[in-house]
Amino acid sequence: MKYPLFLVSIILVLLLNPHSSCFADGAGRIAFVSTRDGGTEIYVMNFDGGDQRRLTHDLREKGEPAWSLDGRYLSYHGKDASGRTGIHVISVDGTSLRRLTDSNDMGAVWSPDERSMAFYSFERG
């Protein structure tokens, strides 16, 4: 019975930090990060744990997946080959991967109209 503890943990995170929700709005899916395949990758699954799918495949460090409000895209931060962290967006079917920034940026959240994002950066200057 590890699912109840997992769900309680997710609910507490959402209550304490609602802008970083890992749930798709109304779709019952969860986005998460796992190293189960040897690298740090982004996955999605149904709320009940079924239909787990890996979206990214480059084995580089990633984190903080955040759903677009319409549930069609995920943003996350990820490192490139040179080790710089930037904001990426990928569709939930695993296609249409785009890198939006390359300046040591993290923590992206979508604006209500999904036309822009807020994020924090460790870039100097």
Image (cartoon, rainbow, N blue to C red):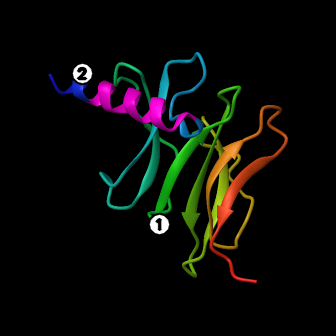
Q: Secondary structure at mark 2?
A: helix
Q: Which residue is mark 1?
A: 60
* Rendering coords of residue 92 (x, y %): 60, 35
Left or right: residue 55 versus residue 70 is: left
Q: Nearer the viewer, residue 122 or 1?
A: 122
Q: How many marks?
A: 2
**Residue at figure coordinates x 82%, y 46% from the top left:** 116
Q: Indicate whether residue 17 is drawn in magenta.
A: yes
Q: Which residue is mark 2?
A: 4
53 versus 80 height, above or below: above
* Rendering coords of residue 88 (x, y %): 66, 55
Q: CA distance from mark 2 to mark 1?
A: 31 Å
* Rendering coords of residue 42 (x, y %): 47, 47
**Residue at figure coordinates x 71%, y 46% from the top left:** 96
Q: Indicate whether residue 23 is drawn in magenta.
A: no
Q: Specify the farthest residue to the front.
A: 16
Q: Nearer the viewer, residue 22 or 59?
A: 22
The N terminus is located in which quarter?
top left
Q: Nearer the viewer, residue 53 or 27?
A: 27
**Residue at figure coordinates x 50%, y 35% from the top left:** 22
Magenta span: helix, strand or loop, mainly? helix
